[in-house]
Image (spheres, rainbow, N blue to C red):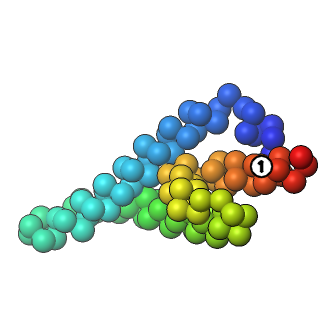
Amino acid sequence: MSKILNSKMVFPIKLISVFLITSAIVLEIWNIYTPFNNETTSNSLNIVFWIGRFALFSHFLEAIIATFYANSRNRIPLQYGIYTFFVGTIGLLELFRKEDINVES
């Protein structure tokens, strides 16, 4: 696990993840907004919407796990939950790593 977090690829993955999750949120808002204005979205975008929904759902589950784990370890749960929602699995790995470092000390 420490090899992953010490990699040079962590920061770019975090940036890309924040961008893609934010894009998925915007696409969902747009998809909800269009029927209210008698507009339609292209059927070819359905796969994009489903991939975005899957990513949002999985990041939401990771955020819930991070929130409960941080709360049980006397950390700031909302901060870790939001961070993990946008960053994804790397946020969970960082939270678990901080716990490992504290246990070893």
Q: Nearer the viewer, residue 78 or 33?
A: 78
At mark 1, the secondary structure is: helix
In the depicted structure, whether residue 87 falls above or below residue 49: above
| Numbered circles on residues, count | 1
Q: Position of residue 95 (x, y in %)?
A: 70, 53
Which residue does the numbered mark 1 point to in the structure image?
A: 97
Q: Position of residue 99 (x, y in %)?
A: 78, 54
Which residue is located at x 53 percent, y 62 percent? 78
Q: Is residue 62 visible?
A: no
Which residue is located at x 43 percent, y 59 percent? 52
Q: Nearer the viewer, residue 34 or 101?
A: 101
Which residue is located at x 63 percent, y 50 percent? 91
Q: Is residue 46 visible?
A: yes
Q: Position of residue 76 (x, y in %)?
A: 59, 59
Name which residue type carries label 1: Arg
In the depicted structure, whether residue 19 falls above or below residue 85: above
Specify few, some or many for label 1: CA neighbours under 10 Å numbering under 14, 14-19, or 20 or more.
Answer: some
Q: Position of residue 96 (x, y in %)?
A: 75, 54
**Could you tell whether 24 is left or right of 59 in the image?**
left
Task: Kindly give the residue lying farthest to the left in the view shown.
Answer: 38
Q: Nearer the viewer, residue 71 or 53?
A: 71
Q: Quadrant of residue 61?
A: bottom right
Task: Kindly give the residue lying farthest to the top in the view shown.
Answer: 8
**Could you tell whether 22 is left or right of 59 in the image?**
left
In the depicted structure, whether residue 69 falls above or below residue 92: below
Which residue is located at x 75 percent, y 33 percent? 6
In the depicted structure, whether residue 102 falls above or below residue 5: below
